[in-house]
Amino acid sequence: MGSTIDILECYTEPLQKLIEIVHCGSKPECVNILITNNKSEYMYTLDASKGYFVIGFKNQILDMLMTHRMHDLVELYREMSESNQLSAASKEFMNIFFRMMDEDVRYSDGKTNYANYWTFQRKQIALLLYNRRKDMIEAIEKVVEAS
């Protein structure tokens, strides 16, 4: 698992990095979301009270996940910034990232136009989760076998 400084100084996509570390990492108990078909508008989330995965709308689930992890990023940024653990370049990058995530202006990655940067990030996170599905399924199988 990466350190918090790795997340905030990755200079690529800190939200994607955090989601990958938390939800696709080595802790099977954190694997609580799953995309099995990237073309579908549905995905699975773990319902802890029921003890099994339930289906839901992909965009709604991803938006909720992104909102929670954005709060985590803001808190990590605040803590590390206050303790002078971030370089000036990292602070600038994170401020730009936070601003872009809040803006409601069109965004293009050069190939596709998106309603905004949030929508672009949601698509990228869906791809990340889909591409890591085998690792996630293996982690889930370990939890089931241990039960």
Image (cartoon, rainbow, N blue to C red):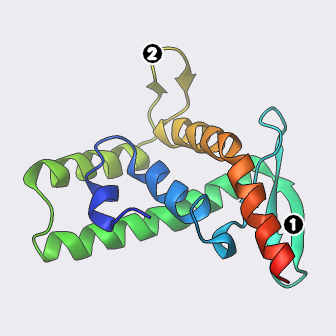
Nearer to us of marks 2 and 1 is: 1
Q: Mark 2 or mark 1, which has the lower sequence index? A: 1
What's the residue at 76%, 58% (across, down)? 138
What's the residue at 61%, 58% (across, down)? 24
Q: Is residue 145 depicted above or below 64 in this figure?
A: below
Q: Observer-nearest residue: 69 or 20?
A: 20
Q: Position of residue 23 (x, y in %)?
A: 61, 62
Q: Position of residue 101 (x, y in %)?
A: 42, 47
Crowding at label 2, few (<14), some or many (≥20) Cα neighbours within 10 Å? Answer: few
Locate residue 53 relative to residue 22 in the image: left or right. Answer: right
Report which residue position mark 2 lands on: 110
Q: Secondary structure at mark 1?
A: strand
Q: Amino acid at mark 2?
A: Gly
Q: Is residue 47 depicted above or below 16 in this figure?
A: below
**Quadrant holding the C terminus:** bottom right
Which label is found at residue 53? Answer: 1
Q: Secondary structure at mark 2?
A: loop
Task: Report the label total.
Answer: 2
Q: Amino acid at mark 1?
A: Phe
